Image (cartoon, rainbow, N blue to C red):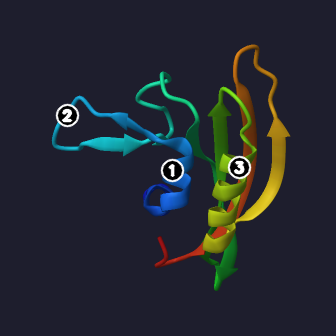
Amino acid sequence: MKQKLLSTLTADSELVSLVGKIKSADKVQGNIPCIFSNTPSSWDTLPAVVFLEKDGEDAVFADDVCIARTVVIQIDVYAKTSVTRVFDRVSLLLRNMGFVCKRVMDIPEPTNRHRMGIFNITVYEGEN
């Protein structure tokens, strides 16, 4: 699920234009959007989107066999100024993938803006 989410977020030209790109030391990779799974490779460039799989549990059973699980994703958006446009775009992309927003929080930090969202989706066996 994380790879599918990373692919969806980095393929969205509007989101990439909002967060920008960082220069990679590896010339083969070129510029990398400021969208990271788990831990950013650099905190130097903001705004940035960071996500991780927060939780997962068996959700649907048939004949005592789990056929689907619920995946919970945590999205964090960091910026020097407003996080609203970036967070709203990420939220729209996740909802288009079938995620449901469960919780959104503005987290006070002394130097940056930080908004966290919790989204979940039920994934059936055979789906990514």
Placement of 127 over or under 71, stated as above or below: below
Res. 1 in view: no
- Neighbour class for label 3 at 10 Å: few (<14), some, many (≥20)? few
Q: Is residue 19 left or right of residue 113?
A: left
Q: Amino acid at mark 2?
A: Asp
Per the image, the residue denoted by label 1 is 17
- SS assignment at label 1: helix
Disc 3 vs disc 1: Cβ atoms closer than 8 Å? Answer: no
Expressed as whole percent of the image width and height from the top left, the position of residue 42 reads 43, 25
Res. 33 in view: yes
Q: CA distance from mark 1 to mark 2?
A: 21 Å
Residue extending furthest toward the left: 28
- Say which residue appears at 80% left-offset and 29% top-offset: 107
- Say which residue appears at 83% left-offset and 39% top-offset: 105
Q: Amino acid at mark 1?
A: Ser
Per the image, the residue denoted by label 2 is 26
- Say which residue appears at 75% left-offset and 45% top-offset: 84
Who is closer to the viewer here, 95 or 63? Answer: 95
- SS assignment at label 2: loop
Q: Is residue 99 left or right of residue 32?
A: right
Expressed as whole percent of the image width and height from the top left, the position of residue 41 reads 41, 29
Placement of 117 over or under 6, stated as above or below: above
Q: CA distance from mark 3 to mark 1?
A: 11 Å
Q: Quadrant of residue 77?
A: top right
Per the image, the residue denoted by label 3 is 85
